[in-house]
Amino acid sequence: MSSSEHHDESFIQKYVFSTDHKTIGIQYGITALLYLFFGFVLMMIMRWQLAFPEKALPIIGKWFGESRMPGGVMLPEFYNQLGAMHGTVMIFLGVVPLAVGAFGNYVVPLQIGAPDMAFPRLNMASYWVYAVGGLTMLISFLLPGGAAQSGWTSYPPLADLATDMGQTAWLLGMVFLITSSLLGSINVIVTILQLRAEGLTLMRMSFFVWSQLVTGFILLLAFPPLEVAGILQLLDRVIDTSFFIPSGLVVGGKALEGYSGGGSPLLWQHLFWFLAHPEVYVLILPAMGIVGEIIANNTRKPLWGYKSIVYSASFLGFMSFIVWAHHMYLTGMGTGISSFFQATTMIISIPSVIILTAFMISLWGGSIRFNTPMLFALGFIPMFGIGGLTGLPLGLNTSDVHLHDTYYVIGHFHYVIAPGTIFALFAGIYFWFPKITGRKMDEKLGKIHFWGSMLFMNIIFFPMFAQGLAGVSRRLWDGGVTYAHAQEVLHLNLLISQGAWGLCLFQFPFIFNFFNSIKNGEKVSDNPWEATTLEWAAAPSPPLPHRNFEVMPQVFRSAYEYSVPGEEKDFSPQNQEPLEA
Amino acid sequence: MASGHSHDDVRSHVQSYLLVFAALGLLTVVTVLVSYFPFGIAGGIIVALMVATVKGTLVAQIFMHLKSEAKGIYGLLLLTGFFLLGLFFLTIITVMSQQGDDISLQYQKSIETHHSTGGH
Amino acid sequence: MVEIPYRTEIRPDTGVYNGKMGIWLFIASEVMLFGGLFSTYILLRVGAVSWPEGSEILNVPIATFNTMVLITSSVTMVMAWASLAMNNFSGFKTHMGLTILLALVFLVAKAIEYNAKFSHGLFPKTNTFLAIYFTMTGLHAIHILGGIVVNAYLWFTGEKMWKAGERQGLMNRVEVAGLYWHFVDLVWIFLFPTFYLLGGK
């Protein structure tokens, strides 16, 4: 096929229904960033209610109408909608599509020396199914009764019986999103295993590609039980089956009628958490992959312990399937099985520690360049450290009795996802921007974005540990005002909310920088970071449509050959032949 | 041929397909008949599962060519099987370890007690 | 445009072509999907006060017939692929056509079965046994429908590929569709005794 075929592509073929992994990656990226911002806005509105319980939100409050914020004062029902959708949107519409759909799609074929993903049309399909699923979730806000309001965890019997139509829309949306994810994971795995360039053995792959491979397997095998659960809950809601409705349920003082009973609310929890635990490793692995790339590149040294990192990531993926009931310690299970899950949970913390330690040791003796991607990558390390360490009392069944469903949990997981994963994703955007556009983002704005975000992330999430330890429950619409045990830590609500709004302010330099640099950013060469991996060393910036490389590369070296003794430059690209012995 | 199947290979495969067809038919009859035997509930489940596993193995090995398939595919299926067993066993062990009776049973019992005392 | 490698040829170090790896990965996810449903069955049954014997409520003869129908369709499916491998295109059309026909027979029998239940006032909401029965066999039936669509597509468009010299490509597609079809048969092999033949409590 000649390259003139591509100048014949219509606008629709080139930009809307494209099968080119780079276009699809950008589609995922822009869509996901918009959802991340939307999810952030949802949370900022929630934080008003928590900082100023039952006070009217000036001007903006009235826009939400009488059914949500009469007179600008938030109804509990609306608070619950914001809460459930904030979690759902951030995880399933924001972080994973960005980490896997955008970065995975754009970078993986380039880093392995392939012309595209293994199944380009399937790739296009997975983006559009994601788009439909996301739209379904968005529209749910406008349905009678509003959006889902039973938490992102959607526990029955509440979620089964909730009268808001948004819950049904949520379930439909999840079915679409899970389908999109399954199609995408098949594509990623086949691409990595089948389309690697000549000479690119598995142990010469970058850690980023390894992280996407393990993530693909997790998504493939962990999501289906949640798809089942979603279908079962839909059936409960639409045709009145009793998969999750126990016998003898009393609702609002009356015996529930119209259901056969015999079901089990615990069944939902098992099916849900079977996915939702591995899901958190889906959230962190691509982030670790990005951080690994950037550390190696900006220390001008190979990653320390590449083999340990790869084996750890694989072991992590494997273990993630047998720890899930640590989310269910308070459901009344016996001590034997509880100890089993506690044991596997403790074991799974080991590979994470190995990876983080390897990253830290990688810094030792390096010629560190403190550019914006590196600042975010460095920031990831202590933030993920705090997130991981605070997970330990939650993984131990006895201490979890006190901390389950409190703000301690919210602090823990946000540390891992927000100044953890999202920092890594920011790092990835600053890092790969020059490859995608041929221009660099502005360094000064980048540093402002970093320092502001770092400060405010900690202001928001650190106080939550104190609140949780004092016993403040999560998902409380009034932030704990009515509880005696919460009084001492209530003032932190105002601080946290101010932190949230402050964090928002510091995202504007990033948003401006991102769009402005597309047109006005400093023009750079194909390999401005002087990196060793194939996307930098062998492809132009941006890479060629539908083929990526002028000449398909051949690989002779491992992924991070920086500062190799005897070589002329401090980096030796993977496609560069080794010096004669 | 790129897929490594010569005409003679395929012809001998066809023989095995027809043999397996016969075996599957027979095993179907067996599984129905055996369900009338007095093995008890647990016994019935075990026998039914065993027959189904034999049938399934035949379909997988012969129809799906697993017998001659790449090692990686076997590895994938083993991994999947491990996670599947984890899903089955860990779930049921956890539910059965509930302190007290299963929620459903508790409610059922409370309804029975209600009815037997005439309710209110 | 650079061709995507290993679409039809086998990659030496993995031993498969892309489509075959893709379909096995898909099958693995489907194992977890039906596995989730079987796990639901187990939990509901263990927690139930009483559970019907399959033959009390369900129609064993129709289901036995359907089991034979599906097994036969699996044979005709693999014979369709084998015909192509032996350069016998009309053999492919015959066997693939039979596969589609048998699949339709299965669905018709299923529809008759379901209808009989509904007309006796037995619905998914009636009790948890029926709920999981209808859901699992229903989802299975949807998978059969999907298979019919794919197989019909191959039946109609196969000639074009064959005549254009893309023989290996067509063979591979039929092999991949066949793997999916055998999996659907496999699920039924487990569904049938679980619902129709097991005793109750």
Image: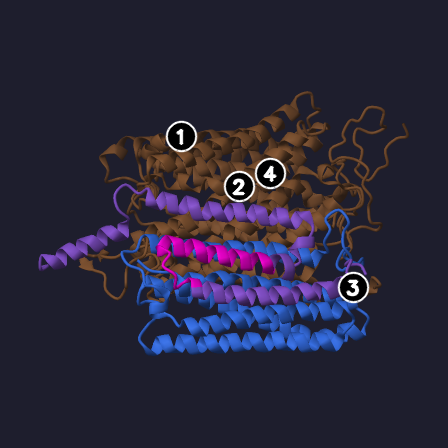
Q: Mark 3 vs mark 4: tell me if same chain.
A: no
Secondary element under disc 4, as helix, strand or loop, is: helix
Give the quarter of the image for residue A314. Answer: top right
Looking at the image, do the residues carrying marks 3 and 2 touch, with CB atoms under 8 Å apart?
Answer: no
Q: For residue A557, say whether it is visible.
A: yes
Whether marks 1 and 4 lie on the same chain: yes
- The amino acid pointed to by label 4 is Ser
Give the CA separation, mark 2 to mark 4.
11 Å
At which x and y percent is residue A233? 38, 59
Range drawn in magenta: B34-59
Question: Residue at label 2?
Answer: A281
* Letter of the chain that mark 1 sits on in the rendering: A
Q: Which chain is purple?
A: B
Label 2: few (<14), some or many (≥20) within 10 Å?
many
The disc at residue A314 is 4
The reply to whether discs 1 and 2 touch (Cβ–Cβ < 8 Å) is no
Between B81 and A30, the residue placed more toward the observer is: B81
Q: Which residue is mark 3?
A: B8
Q: Which residue type does callout 1 highlight?
A: Pro
Whether residue A326 is situated above or below residue A362 in the rendered picture: below
Pointer 1 and pointer 3 on the same chain: no
What number is the disc on residue B115?
Answer: none
Asked if residue A179 is positioned above or below residue A530 in the image, the reply reads below
